[in-house]
Image (cartoon, rainbow, N blue to C red):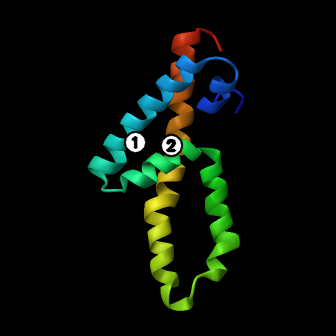
Amino acid sequence: MKYFRSYWYYWHTGHPVVALSSMVLSLVILFSGMVLLAGFSLWGVLLALVLDLLGLMAVLAYALFLRTLVPDLMLEQADFWILNQFVLPVIAAFVVNRLVTYGVARLLLGRI
């Protein structure tokens, strides 16, 4: 995993061009694939793009702690909404972000 770093890593290590380029390219790929073709929410994709690893932690927090606070009558709808509008975009964004950032960093910085 040392090569598949987040774009936030490149932002904080002084490579803002790599970070911003990979964010824009990831947004274009996720927008075209998830919003236009699959019908996901744009807000879920944007949130997943910005949060990156924190999005996975938020999903874990919902599954372990916050789910118990939802009333039983709304649990099925809440689970469906969280899964479709947040969990799937977060997982897809995590994978796409890492691959795109690796490619952009390799292209712009040469050898990583």
Residue occupying the point 45% across, 34% down: 26
Relative to 16, 24 lies left or right = left
Do the numbered discs 2 and 1 sit on residues whose CB atoms are within 8 Å?
yes
Residue 80: % across, % down: 45, 73
Dot 2 alpha-carbon crowd within 10 angstroms: few under 14, some 14 to 19, many 20 or more: many
Residue occupying the point 32% across, 50% down: 35
Q: Quadrant of the N terminus?
A: top right
Relative to 74, 15 lies left or right = right
Q: Secondary structure at mark 2?
A: helix
Residue 44: % across, % down: 44, 54
Residue tagged by mark 1?
Answer: 30
Q: Quadrant of the C terminus?
A: top right
Q: What amino acid type should be assigned to the residue bearing mark 2?
A: Leu
Name which of mark 2 and mark 1 comes first in the sequence. 1
On screen, residue 64 above or below 18: below
> Mark number for residue 51?
none
Q: Secondary structure at mark 1?
A: helix
Q: What amino acid type should be assigned to the residue bearing mark 1?
A: Leu
Residue occupying the point 50% across, 67% down: 82
* Image quadrant where residue 71 sits: bottom right
> Mark number for residue 49?
2
Examine the rendering and report whether any part of residue 5 can be seen: no
* Image quadrant where residue 68 sits: bottom right
Dot 1 alpha-carbon crowd within 10 angstroms: few under 14, some 14 to 19, many 20 or more: many
